[in-house]
Amino acid sequence: MFGLEALDLARIQFAFTISFHILFPAITIGLASYLAVLEGLWLKTRNDTYRDLYHFWSKIFAVNFGMGVVSGLVMAYQFGTNWSRFSDFAGAVTGPLLTYEVLTAFFLEAGFLGVMLFGWNKVGRGLHFFSTVMVAIGTLISTFWILASNSWMQTPQGFEIVNGQVIPTDWLAIVFNPSFPYRLLHMATAAFIATAFFVGSSAAWHLLRGRDNPAIRTMLSMAMWMALIVAPIQAVIGDFHGLNTLKHQPAKIAAIEGHWENHGDEATPLILFGWPDMKEERTKFAVEIPYLGSLILTHSLDKQVPALKEFPPEDRPNSTIVFWSFRVMVGLGFLMIFTGLWSLWLRKRDSLYTSRPFLHLALWMGPSGLIAILAGWFTTEIGRQPWVVYGLMRTADASSNHSFLQMSITLVMFVVVYFALFGAGLGYMMRLVRKGPKLSEGTDTPDGGPGKKRTPARPLSAADDPADGEHEDNTRLTKEI
């Protein structure tokens, strides 16, 4: 069907599940740190705005955390069901790394999550803040181990192969493999940026509807400071990551650039747009800028970038996909930098919270961080092909011996269940966002804090049924963010 085989369906199934999963940890990482900052600011300033924002975003964090755990468990099982030969080959490396993630990050998060979500008026202020910080650190530790495992598959080292299986010989070399530092920084920073634009988009939605209060303004202000500072830093990290990829995975860079062949000693141009054709071995409709490819990728005007024709056809990634996924990621990155700079200009003119064109941009930028993460992930994983462990094991040799019918049935089931389950979860999160933070000076929200009377955080019952006339707002927000 459509020229697909069981292997193709196994890859599509894993790509589908991991695409759903990666969105939730990204927001979890960013929100956990955001909550720690909010509580720390409240403890320092006693400004109730920070406390109100903490309670608001902690509910959204709880729902997002739960969906991340569920989607992650399903993804992990696929290593044994659909990729058993990969597990047999590299399980001695990937298995312990995932176990370390459970023993450190997951236990840390689970141990303090209950105190963080339900202990606001049950424990002292110091212990509650410590719990929030521990959950935030736990999300970063989880990122550390997951990226260590994935990076080893991209740039493997610290092992030997005995009887067709990978045997670890140096765990420090395995964990701190050549691409790991760049991938870790790139992913963690992407999570912070994605969360910033999610928070900023939520604030913009309320401001556009006239719901202007200190909490909403603080949300937008903090989000735009994050965009202004961190988005350019991400561009620098991406540049270093690209240099590392050029050194260790040159075929991936050639595919990303849609660069097929070098001519004499000419510098490599940058192809802005075009359509890489894998069969004809050329990039159609190419719009090029001379020398810029060499300047960006080698930081010189005379060095050449490896070309796809320098690699056997069976070793070339699919340039058609990664060429465009990379440009989606970079394009959104530039748009994020622009948004941050515009916010600074408006802030100086004292119109950050009233400029409707900017607020509309901030609203529509809400999912931009998550889309950029998906585009970057596609670039990374598809660009690694045809290898599941780069240079050691091909993807075609890693899959389980399932039939096309079996993979078709399970893929359809995953699509139906995921859209139903996580679609409902996303809808519930949007209802929480639509309600907005409750202000402590409001009549329906008693003053509180550790040791004082306050309605406890109950994430699964936090979104009341919308009042009459509010259903339209809920539907609009779900579509816009």
Image: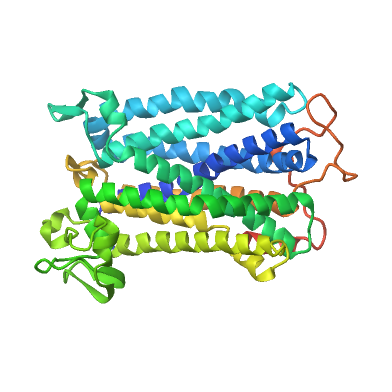
Q: Residue at x 79, y 30 (%)?
A: 449
Q: Quadrant of the C terminus?
A: bottom right
Q: Residue at x 72, y 43 (%)?
A: 53
As drawn, which residue projects farthest toward the left? 264
Q: Nearer the viewer, residue 159 or 242?
A: 242
Image-based side of 82 in relation to 204, left or right: left
Q: Quadrant of the N terminus?
A: bottom left
Residue 190 in percent (x, y) is at 47, 48
Residue 241 in the image: above or below residue 180: below
Image-based side of 259 in relation to 479, left or right: left
Q: How many marks?
A: 0
In the rendered image, is residue 480 in sight? no
Q: Residue at x 26, y 64 (%)?
A: 293
Q: Nearer the viewer, residue 84 or 63?
A: 63
Residue 424 in percent (x, y) is at 60, 50
* Res 289 → quadrant: bottom left
In the rendered image, is residue 138 in sight? yes
Residue 408 in the image: above or below residue 3: above
Residue 473 in percent (x, y) is at 73, 62
What colouring does the structure picture have?
rainbow
Q: Residue at x 78, y 60 (%)?
A: 470
As drawn, which residue projects farthest toward the right? 443
Image-based side of 265 in relation to 429, left or right: left
Residue 365 in percent (x, y) is at 56, 61
